[in-house]
């Protein structure tokens, strides 16, 4: 099972942002509409994004620095509370 997750993650990017949806690409990945995010928190190097019903934790240590800068830019454009 671990090998199948490993190969899946090698083929797909960790995160994608398309058409206003932030999606964690894992076999059972979550997706959140950017417009639904009402709180963003940076804790221990991770981003925790919260909506009314969902929570998505993004591990920033495994993201390429250039992609991380793009993600941070997209999150800062949102009019949400940062903690």
Image (spheres, rainbow, N blue to C red):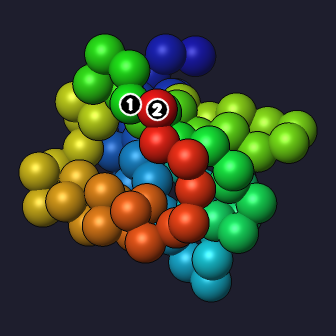
Q: Residue at x 31, y 16 (%)?
A: 44
Dot 1 alpha-carbon crowd within 10 angstroms: few under 14, some 14 to 19, many 20 or more: some
Residue to which mark 2 is pinned: 83
Q: Do the CB atoms of the residues marked 1 and 2 lie less than 8 Å apart? A: yes
- Assign a secondary structure to mark 1: strand
First along the sequence among labels 1 and 2: 1
Can the viewer see residue 16 in this picture? yes
Residue at the spot 29% in from the left edge and 35% down from the top edge: 60
What number of labels is visible? 2
Q: Secondary structure at mark 2?
A: loop
Q: Position of residue 19 (x, y in %)?
A: 62, 83
- Residue 32, x across and y down, in percent: 70, 55
Neighbour tally class for label 2: few under 14, some 14-19, many 20 plus, Cα within 10 Å: few
Q: Residue furthest right?
A: 53
Q: Quadrant of the N terminus?
A: top right
Residue closer to the observer: 7 or 28:
28
Q: Which residue is mark 1?
A: 42
Q: Position of residue 23 (x, y in %)?
A: 60, 56
């Amino acid at each position: 099972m671990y090998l199948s997750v490993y190969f899946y993650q090698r083929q797909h990017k960790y995160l994608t942002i398309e058409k206003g949806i932030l999606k964690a690409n894992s076999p059972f990945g979550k997706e959140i509409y950017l417009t639904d995010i009402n709180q963003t928190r940076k804790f221990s190097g991770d981003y925790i994004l919260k909506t009314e019903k969902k929570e998505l934790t993004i591990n920033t240590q495994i993201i390429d620095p250039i992609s991380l800068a793009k993600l941070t830019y997209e999150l800062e454009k949102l009019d949400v509370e940062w903690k």
